[in-house]
Image: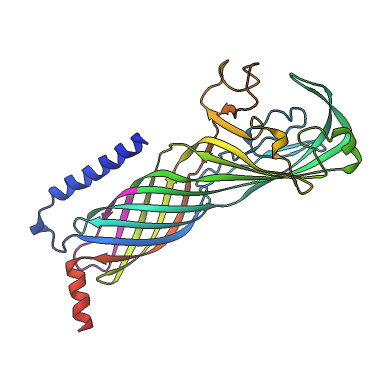
Amino acid sequence: MQKNLSLIWLFVLCTQLMYAQTPEKKNKRGGYWTLRVAGGYAWPGMQNSEGIMGPKIDPFSPEKDGLLPMANISDTLPLYEPVRGSYGNGINFTLGVGYMINPYIGFEMGVSVLKSKTFSCSQTRGLTQRLVEGPPPQYQALGYYFMQANISTSALGISLMPSIIIQGAKPGWKVYPYSRLGISMPIFGALEHKVSIDVDTIVLGLIQNDPYYLGKHVDVTLKTEGTVSLGVNGALGVAYRPLPYIMITAEVNGQYLVTRAKSAKVTQWDTDGNDRIADRGVYRSEFNFVDKLDGNSNNADYNLNYDKNKPKDDLRPTGPFSNLGFNIGISVLLSKETLKKKEKKKE
């Protein structure tokens, strides 16, 4: 948080210095405030090679929960196909307040809301039966019996975007190019993962006590929250001013951002319509993400004295939010000059 505040203060200082170095006499149009509303759609970018994270499904170690790269998996074919993309792929809306020091240079503080595309995968996994209690428990395959798991994930986030704006606009021009360069700072949001699992009723008597198979149908929701992350964004566009106080923009924009997870929590674990979260306990329902695991971590793989009544420590996953897209926007320009012209037209 302190790092983010330092960057904001540095940004404001730079814009104030630019303002101080711009003589009023040379500012033919004068400074003006802008209020911008924009919306558009973005794609993953040029490579689309980043992995999407999802809840771990593994019948041979069902007691080891966590997040792994999502993949389409079939134990019958066999098949393993990773799901790739970016949570930056989706619709976005921006509200920005800015100040143009002169016709060429200004700054803006934007708030951007992103609703990502939903990513999904399907996994057909062979069922197992618990043979030996842990630690660690041991499982054996049940032969030709399988479970079907469907996993989906999406993101909803809000970011602050302080930016510097450069316009190629001489006084009087109605159409001109512009560019914007800024910082992406996520301040709110989460990833939501949903899992549904179906099991053949024939084998429920053998596996009903195991974590995945408390019933015929299981619905799970897991929410992941992020910690401090920083990225960069930019845009190239064309502006059109049909009126002195109105500006319409069309732009191509891009962002490079990788978020870091802070924690995750299972908020739903329903078995055949019944809430069974309490059966899992805190260790199986809450996760604290860290950068390393050792003998002091609350993780059974590294610490035999781990506490089942505390969240599980696990390695920190990341989420790709880089994208490339387009936006259409409209801005209201507020200055003494534009307001006077507006009053004259009304008269």
Quadrant where the image shows the C terminus = bottom left
The quarter holding residue 281 reads top right
Q: How is the image coloured?
A: rainbow
Rendering coords of residue 47 (x, y %): 53, 43
Tell me which residue sits at (51%, 25%) in the image. Answer: 291
Relative placement, left or right, of 249 versus 171 is right
Tell me which residue sits at (47%, 50%) in the image. Answer: 324
Relative placement, left or right, of 6 versus 118 is left
Q: Main secondary structure of the magenta part?
A: strand
The magenta stretch spans residue 221: no
Q: Residue furthest left?
A: 25
Q: Is residue 331 above or below residue 126?
A: below
Q: Residue furthest right?
A: 202
The magenta stretch spans residue 178: yes
Rendering coords of residue 232 (x, y %): 39, 43
Q: How many marks?
A: 0
Tell me which residue sits at (77%, 32%) in the image. Answer: 59
Q: Nearer the viewer, residue 272 or 119?
A: 272
Quadrant where the image shows the N terminus = top left
Q: Residue furthest bottom?
A: 347
Relative placement, left or right, of 265 versus 146 is left
Rendering coords of residue 131 (x, y %): 85, 23
Rendering coords of residue 28 (x, y %): 13, 63
Q: Nearer the viewer, residue 80 or 298?
A: 298
**Is residue 86 at least partly visible in the picture?**
no
**Is residue 211 at least partly visible in the picture?**
yes
Per the rendered image, the range of residues in magenta is 162-180
Q: Nearer the viewer, residue 323 or 219?
A: 219
The quarter holding residue 127 reads top right
